[in-house]
């Protein structure tokens, strides 16, 4: 059973870590029978009417659990994790939904709306429709981003991975072969005009910042040709990008 665990607004402006790192650390708090498949950063609307720390993003941990699903224990672990790692002045929110919950389509619509307009806690509470949604400090506004993060991640066509797989994204070298990426479960697609197939023996320069996209419910790395048998992935670390963790 797949479970989506959304976190938002757990940091503050002076923090040396963001909600993304808290979501990645959640792997260490998972109960037995559960495994972290990945953590996805979701970008929401940037608007002066919305209070946010750096980029108004939320993070969703994707967890695969054996049956019977220890959902209550998983939620308890997530709450304790927030209480332990969230920072003063933050407005943490948590949303937890399973792949079989009837609310996922509503949460996806909510997430898509959050990417283009200002929504409220009341809107989030309506969208969650019985799944877990809770605030853990401050204004509790984090429930908005947490719900949106779950909806967009369950949709499968939005966001970028900030953690993925057993070895983790940070274990792969700066220059990595296409075959190594594919063996790690990360698909590689060319963004060139003719959409060439990228051979397994070709190399990809990640710039030390490997961040696959969530496309079709899978981890996919878009690349552009940079030379003979050499590709590069778009996007590099920007200022304060460390806040994603």
Image: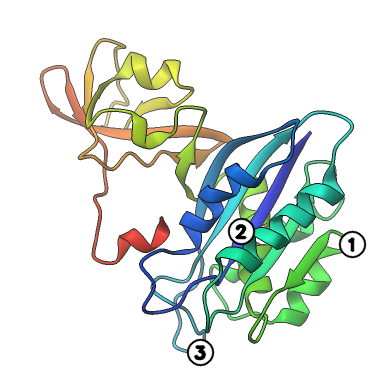
Q: Nearer the viewer, residue 146 or 86?
A: 86
Residue in the image at 78% along x and 56% along y: 76
Q: Earlier in the sequence, mark 1 or mark 2?
A: 1
What number is the disc on residue 149?
A: 2
Residue farthest along the front direction in this orientation? 84
| In the image, farthest residue toward the bottom | 49
19 relative to 220, above or below: below
Residue 60 visible in rendering: yes
Picture quadrant of residue 211: top left
Describe the element under mark 1 as helix, strand or loop: loop
Q: CA distance from mark 1 to mark 3?
A: 28 Å
Instruction: Please indicate, yes or no, whether residue 158 appears anywhere in the rendered image.
Output: no
Looking at the image, which is closer to me, 82 or 213?
82
Query: Residue 201: x percent and y percent?
Result: 25, 10
Could you give the CA–CA distance between mark 3 and mark 2, rounded to whole angstroms? 19 Å
Give left or right: position of 48 versus 122.
left
The image shows residue 75, relative to residue 183, as above or below, that is below
Residue displayed at 79% across by 33% down: 1
**Label 3 CA crowd tier, 10 Å (few <14, some 14–19, many 20+):** few
Compared to residue 137, the image places residue 10 above or below, namely above
Residue 72: image location, x then y, percent: 86, 51
Where is residue 213? Give x, y as percent.
Answer: 44, 41
Figure quadrant of the C terminus: bottom left
Q: Which residue is mark 1?
A: 130
Using the rendered view, name the quadrant where residue 119 is placed. Answer: bottom right
> In the displayed image of the protein, which residue is found farthest to the left?
227
Q: Which mark is residue 49?
A: 3
Q: Badges 1 and 2: C-beta atoms under 8 Å apart?
A: no
The answer to whether marks 1 and 3 mark residues whose Cβ atoms lie closer than 8 Å is no
The residues tagged by marks 1 and 2 sit, at their Cα atoms, a distance apart of 17 Å
Foreground tag (1 vs 3): 1
Name the N-terminal-most of marks 1 and 3: 3
């Amino acid at each position: 059973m797949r479970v989506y665990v959304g976190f938002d607004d757990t940091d503050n402006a002076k923090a040396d870590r963001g909600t993304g790192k808290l979501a990645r650390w959640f792997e260490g708090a998972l109960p037995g029978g559960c495994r972290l498949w990945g953590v996805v950063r979701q970008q929401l609307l940037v608007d002066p009417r919305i209070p946010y720390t750096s980029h108004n993003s939320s993070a969703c941990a994707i967890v695969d659990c054996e049956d019977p699903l220890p959902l209550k224990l998983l939620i308890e672990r997530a709450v304790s994790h927030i209480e332990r790692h969230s920072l003063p002045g933050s407005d943490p929110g948590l949303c937890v939904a399973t792949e079989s919950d009837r609310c996922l389509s509503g949460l996806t619509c909510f997430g898509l709306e959050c990417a283009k307009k200002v929504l409220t806690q009341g809107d989030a509470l309506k969208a969650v429709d019985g799944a877990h949604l809770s605030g853990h400090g401050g204004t509790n506004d984090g429930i908005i981003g947490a719900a949106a993060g779950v909806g967009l991640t369950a949709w499968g066509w939005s966001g970028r991975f900030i953690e993925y797989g057993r070895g983790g994204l940070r274990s792969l070298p700066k220059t990595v072969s296409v075959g190594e990426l594919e063996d790690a479960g990360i698909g590689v697609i060319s963004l060139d005009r003719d959409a060439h197939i990228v051979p397994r023996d070709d190399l990809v320069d990640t710039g030390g910042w490997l961040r696959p996209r969530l496309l079709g419910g899978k981890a996919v790395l878009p690349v552009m040709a940079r030379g003979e048998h050499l590709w590069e992935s778009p996007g590099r670390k920007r200022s304060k990008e460390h806040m994603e963790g």
